[in-house]
Image (tube, rainbow, N blue to C red):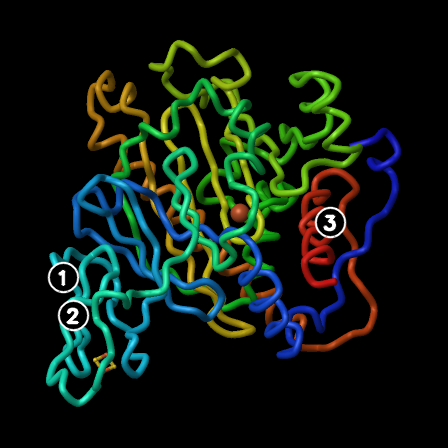
Amino acid sequence: MTEDSATTPLRGALQREYTDPTVFERELTRVFDRDWVLVGRQGTIPKPGDYMTGKLGKRPVVCIRQKDGSIRAFANVCLHRYARLLDGRGNKSRIVCPYHAWTYEISGQLIGITDPKGFGSACKEEMGLRELACEVWLGFVFVSLNRDLPSMSSKLAPLTAHLAHYGLDSYEDRYTFDEEVWAGNWKLVYENFVECYHVTYAHKGSIGPTNPTALAECSTAIWMRTHLDCRAAAEVGSRGQSQFSIHYNPYRPEDYPEIHNLTLDIDERRRLLVIGVYPNALIALDANFVWWMMLEPQAIDRTNGRWGLSFSPLAMTKMKDPVGYAESIRKTIQTATDEDKRVVSAVQAGVSFGSPEPGFLHGTLEIYVDEFRQYLDRMLS
Ligand code: FES
Ligand SMILES: [Fe+2]
């Protein structure tokens, strides 16, 4: 953020960006087909054969834990006549298509064709499910249709450095909720998460009192200049990063979390970090837990958010009542989510009016809505 940006008015997106089916289709193909997309957390599928399904835009995919401990991602589509193979989450030693029972190894290899004579010389050993790029970054599982992209860890290297003290890749993934349907366009859900203007006003029953808007700290660029060397700071430019944004909602002093991870510095102990990773990953992190959500656009005015809560193993070991603590965080997050769902659905109802006049963005507190828009413009152009 520059000095000027605090006073320069920013304009929001046009209302049609949230209602036009042509825009929605372009986003699915030009954004979700072209970038890394968050599917879930690694701890959701800990054992060989565990799988979780998801979507890249509208394309069904599945991530499967392999016998060697790695996670691989495949198109969740049978090679025969395209039936979706797996639903939800579960464990399989082999994948059997529900339609005509073609069978696959969890490595994706086709190993069984029912009534094979009918397929002539089709060679089952050489056939397999379409494999997709899959990368685990700090415990988050990203998948991409494009196998030639730079790695997610290289794109997020400055963020990895910033989060080093937390040990996020070792967090215990305690809760995963596969379905949380929002009555709004996926961009509205994303934009709501990365702006801290609304916290005091929309979250009266959850984080509004403990992490008020008045305490928010919003500047990727200021943080970059003070925490990174000059070369890295120059690369991020004056406004922020090309693949993510981060801002902070500090706790009031009377609400500071218990500290069990003694490597956290003084700022990390008092802050709730709010991170958006383009295009669909939302992450809120404090000294003891991380709340994450991945967005799956289902229709122009409907979005599924798979979300979960993971906890620092230090906190879980040293707290007096870790189960009670985890449950209290779940309840707070569920309340915050319900509050966010109300405001997102209100905006979706409002944009139906179809005004040609763009709205306004706060010059600091909503700066990351503007940065997300810049990312979309790059991907869609
Ligand atoms: S569609 Fe899968 S076996 Fe026929
Ligand atoms: Fe919110």
Residue shown at 62% from the left, 36% from the top:
213
Relative to 325, residue 62 above or below = below
Residue shown at 18% from the left, 57% from the top:
90
Marked residue nearer the N-terminal end (3 or 1):
1
Ligand 1 image-quadrant field: bottom left
Mark 2–mark 1 CB contact (< 8 Å): yes
Marked residue nearer the N-terminal end (3 or 2):
2
Label 1: which secondary element: strand
Relative to 324, residue 53 above or below = below
Quarter placement of the C terminus: bottom right
Residue shown at 70% from the left, 31% from the top:
219
Seen as rendered, the residue at the extreme bottom is 118
Marked residue nearer the N-terminal end (2 or 1):
1
Of 334 and 164, nearer the camera is 164
Residue 238 picture location, percent across and down: 80, 33
Q: Residues within 10 Å of mark 2 (few under 14, many from 20)?
A: many
Of 219 and 143, nearer the camera is 143
How far apart in space, not on screen, are marks 3 and 1 (Cα)? 46 Å
Amino acid type indicated by mark 3: Asp
- Circle 3 sits on which residue? 370
Residue shown at 72% from the left, 32% from the top:
236
- Circle 1 sits on which residue? 94
- Circle 2 sits on which residue? 103
